[in-house]
Image (tube, rainbow, N blue to C red):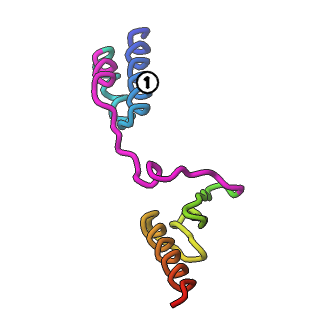
Amino acid sequence: MSYVLIWLGFGVVTALAASARGHNPWLWLFIGCVFGIFGLLAVLVIKPNDDTSRETAQIPVTPTDRPGDLAQQYRGYEIRHGYSGFLVNGQRFKSIDEAQEYIAGEILRKSSASTPD
């Protein structure tokens, strides 16, 4: 019985290490339970998964007062991230890139409108 708990413990520790390194914890739980210390060593040796989203890498996101809603400032505009996409001035966008392109266009439009001929 104690051997089963030890192998299960290796599985849990392996899954936690895999999750912290950006890998599938359920797969590594199984690997850790089957291979024990060797599964744990394997997850510590493999390269961390750096597949992070471009949006979070480019612009820091800070929480607002509503749960599930995120807001960030970009060139003086507020981009709100809700459950169904990104909002800028009441317009909805699927990606942060689309929202930033809209803001760049608005800035360009305002600057060209305010420039006298």
As drawn, 106 above or below 21 = below
Along the line of sight, which residue is nearer the eye, 67 or 107?
Answer: 107
- Occupied quadrant, residue 19: top left
Counting from the top left corner in percent of width and height, residue 20 is at 43, 31
- The residue under the point 50% across, 53% down is 59
Compared across the picture, whether 12 is left or right of 40 comes to right
As drawn, 93 above or below 68 = below
Helix, strand or loop at disc 1? helix
Along the line of sight, which residue is nearer the eye, 36 or 88?
Answer: 88
- Occupied quadrant, residue 73: bottom right
Magenta includes 45?
yes
- The residue under the point 40% across, 53% down is 54
Residue at the extreme right of the image, as rendered? 65
Q: Report the number of discs.
A: 1
- The residue under the point 42% across, 10% down is 1
Along the line of sight, which residue is nearer the eye, 109 or 87?
Answer: 109
Question: What stretch of residues is rendered in magenta?
Answer: 38-65
Compared across the picture, whether 61 is left or right of 27 comes to right
Amino acid type, callout 1: Val
Residue at the extreme front of the image, as rendered? 117
As drawn, 1 above or below 97 = above
**Residue at label 1?**
12
- Occupied quadrant, residue 97: bottom left
Residue at the extreme top of the image, as rendered? 2
- The residue under the point 38% across, 37% down is 22
Crowdedness near tag 1: few (<14), some (14–19) or many (≥20) residues, C-alpha within 10 Å: many
Compared across the picture, whether 63 is left or right of 17 comes to right
Magenta includes 7?
no
Counting from the top left corner in percent of width and height, residue 104 is at 47, 71
Counting from the top left corner in percent of width and height, residue 74 is at 55, 61
